[in-house]
Amino acid sequence: MLDPSNSPSPFHLNPSNSPPSQTSSHPLFPNVDLPPLHPPNHLSIGDLCISLQSADTPMVTTPYFMAVGCIVALKLHTKNLVLRVLERACPAKAPWSIEELDKLERNMFRFIFQSKEDRRRAVEHGPWVVNKDLLFVKEWDPNIPLKDISFITASMWVQIHGIPPAFLSKENIWKVGEKAGSILNLEFNEHTRWKPFVRALLDVDVNRPLYPGFYLPMQSRHSIWIQIKYERVQDLCFRCGRLGHDHEVCSEIEDTIVVALDGSATQLFGPWMRSDLKARDCFHGAWLKKE
């Protein structure tokens, strides 16, 4: 019968009666000094490393183009519904398929495209509306594990309404956009200055309340409210300002309120944040006097 005390550890731990080894380095971490294994049940970085080489297999050189999609919603959606939506909203040039990921990954899907162009359109022309919720699609590089594809942030087109032409510049629009997210693209030129709004593509944190707008102070001692509207957004909670649910199932007890400069109060999040609705803004476009 084997004596467990004499059996070597799979991690090559130093026996308790052996002196600790000297500090050394590991081939994968040449600039990191690895401390000795002391006490004996502690593992170093080197003990837990396995060096792997990229496999030259059809999985890496696949003729297919992969993408991952996530629907930001509390309710569950089926792959058949997603399939019907994309076939109608984003017709593909070549056949493609969709698979549900592990059940633990709620509302996450794997897309298998035969055309790189079809994948590009699915990624860049989104988000897609699936039963009032937003589906975000991102490319899946075969060298990246699924867990590293994050949907904490996703790209969305926003409209910035109400900035006077004299204040419209790339620098100012960039400053506004950075409040709502990270700017990926900006539609602005001299002709844009005289349009009702400016569009920007932002990388937005979808787990936080959407940025609703801001006051723009004016030298005439008046301030105006600049409204941010979000394209394709439908299932937006008017209580907390987050995507994926409405006020009836919101965990917040009270609506989010903004106080105007004249002391009146109004609901901050509302239909005025959706670009497809006619509501102008939370203050109905009124000029607000400073006190």
Image (spheres, helix red, strand yellow):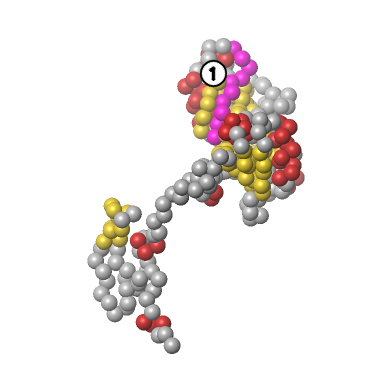
Left or right for 71, reference 170: right
| Residues rendered magenta in the picture | 194-203
Residue at the spot x=39%, y=59% of the render? 49
Q: Is residue 58 visible?
A: yes
- Image spot of residue 146 (x, y percent): 54, 49
Q: Main secondary structure of the magenta part?
A: strand
Q: Which residue is mark 1?
A: 188
The quadrant of the rendering that contains the N terminus is bottom left
Q: Nearer the viewer, residue 230 or 258?
A: 230
Residue at the extreme bottom of the image, as rendered: 1
Q: Is residue 201 magenta?
A: yes
The structure residue drawn at horizontal position 53% and vertical position 12%, both measured from the top left corner, is 190
Q: Which element carries disc 1, helix, strand or loop?
A: loop
Q: Relative to 31, does residue 259 appear above or below in the rendering?
A: above
Res 290 → quadrant: top right
Q: Quadrant of residue 119?
A: top right
Q: Amino acid at mark 1?
A: Phe
Q: Residues within 10 Å of mark 1 (few under 14, many from 20)?
A: some
Q: Residue at x 56, y 11 (%)?
A: 191
Q: Residue 186: percent from the left, percent from the top?
A: 53, 23
In the visual, does 278 lie left or right of 105? right
Q: Can residue 265 be seen here?
A: no
Q: Is residue 259 magenta?
A: no
Name the residue: 73% across, 32% down. Answer: 88
Q: Quadrant of the C terminus?
A: top right
Quarter holding residue 262: top right
Q: Position of residue 80 (x, y in %)?
A: 74, 44
In the displayed orientation, state which residue is furthest to the left. 22
Residues 262 and 218: in front is: 218
Task: Report the front residue among 170 and 162.
Answer: 170
- Residue 124's x, y, as percent? 59, 31
Q: Quick check: 18 left or right of 41?
A: left
